[in-house]
Image (cartoon, rainbow, N blue to C red):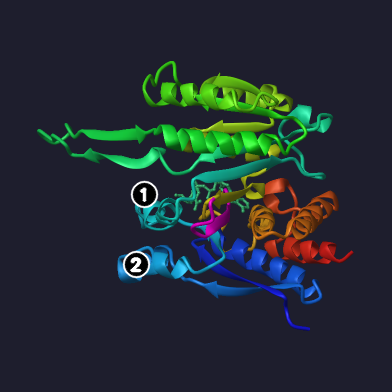
Amino acid sequence: MSATQRFRIAAIPADGVGREVVAAGREVLDALAAGSGGAFAFDWQEFGWGCEYYARTGRMMAEDGLTVLREFDAIYFGAVGWPGVPDHISLWGLRLAICQNFDQWANVRPVRFLPGVRSPLRKADDTELDWVVVRENSEGEYAGLGGRNLSARSPGSEVAVQSALFTEAGCERIMRFAFDLARTRTRRKVSSVTKSNAQQYGMVLWDDVFRRVARDYPDVETESVLVDAMSAKFVLRPEDLSVVVASNLYADILSDLGSALAGSLGLAASANLNPERRFPSMFEPVHGSAPDIAGQGLANPIGAVGSAALMLDHLGLPEQAARLSTAIEATTAAGILTRDLGGAASTDDVTKALIDALNP
Ligand SMILES: NC(=O)c1ccc[n+]([C@@H]2O[C@H](COP(=O)([O-])OP(=O)(O)OC[C@H]3O[C@@H](n4cnc5c(N)ncnc54)[C@H](O)[C@@H]3O)[C@@H](O)[C@H]2O)c1
């Protein structure tokens, strides 16, 4: 039977465990497609960009990389960064180059507590916890504005400026996204995070826009919380969270805290969305390239597989996304866990268990 729907996916495993978890995610997605009776299939093209490519060519991706990627339905990304290449070079040369040029302005990072996974939070044992961090992904502290060595008067006197950019349009679109997302959830609530007591320009603009946008969503509860207080709230009152919207930097940090609270950084999934679909969106685990465990078969593939589920949702296959999420739950509930979760299973063991769980 020929496939009725074919999706062109660009795979960019990049560095370290990125390669292991993208390979695992592809295997799981291909198994899902193989079991669909020809309803859908994935046409993969893999790009060997990353730090090794940089060592050979002086570039993190091909010169025409963005033009090539534009033709795909989605991008499935691993992680970038490797010792020997400065992190700001590798991040800006690949991941941020894609996110920013493809205007993937909404970064969605669900915090999921899985059965069979012990959270460091005692509260998680008897409380239903589930929230989503929505990260502004196009400006803020990662706008890349500033300069270095502006007036180096002598050795030891260097000056650097790193500015954050907040635009009313940028704030408004991410907030509307967060409110619309809250309307799809059991608890209709958006928590906005800033540090507007200390950052009196950009973050006060953020707060003003939040209040204005909130008026269009009277059915959604709101709160504005300073980032230091929100860090404490993640730990002490997480049951009070549903959608958390924050700037590029704050949401980046808070989502790592969220995934650690859920049990491991290796579990966290994310979607970098261009909601208008003018460009392909990119799906990637939250974690980095983990050089400390790379190449040993220890990487937890669940963050990457969860990201594949977000990709399926975006491609219009929500039932398949739900199947993948159920397979993840069945696998962790069965105690098939990698070392970061206290288990002894390898990346391959978990991948196989996920595939088996797709067709119980
Ligand atoms: N999106 C990205 O591509 C991204 C994100 C963060 C960091 N980085 C890069 O990754 C490199 C390493 O950064 P880091 O050490 O700060 O963060 P990291 O996320 O790579 O690792 C932090 C810790 O989490 C563990 N970990 C991460 N992923 C795991 C997985 N799938 N399974 C089990 N354990 C996992 C690691 O072993 C390590 O102990 C740096 O070059 C950094 O710039 C890239």
Q: Amino acid at mark 1?
A: His
Quadrant housing the N terminus: bottom right
Question: What SS does tag 2 mark?
Answer: helix
Sequence-first tag of 1 and 2: 2
Is 270 left, or right, of 203 in this rendering?
A: right
Q: Residue at x 39, y 34 (%)?
A: 167
Residue 277 magenta-drawn? yes
In the rendered image, residue 171, in percent from the top left (x then y), is placed at 47, 33
Q: Does residue 39 lie above or below 358 as drawn?
A: below
Q: Amino acid at mark 2?
A: Ala
The answer to whether one can see residue 132 in this image is no
Residue that extends furthest to the left in the rendered view of this protein = 153
Question: What SS does tag 1 mark?
Answer: helix
Report the label total. 2
Of residue 180 and residue 74, the one placed in the foreground of this image is 180
Is 159 left, or right, of 293 in this rendering?
A: left
Q: Does residue 221 lie above or below 16 as drawn?
A: above
Q: Residue at x 46, y 65 (%)?
A: 70
Q: Residue at x 82, y 63 (%)?
A: 358
Residue that extends furthest to the front in the rendered view of this protein = 216
Residue designated by label 1: 88
Q: Does residue 231 lie above or below 104 as drawn?
A: above
Q: Tell me where the magenta segment starts and ends, as one range.
A: 276-286
Q: Residue at x 48, y 26 (%)?
A: 209
The answer to whether one can see residue 3 in this image is yes
Nearer the observer: mark 1 or 2; the answer is 1
Question: Which label was assigned to residue 55?
Answer: 2
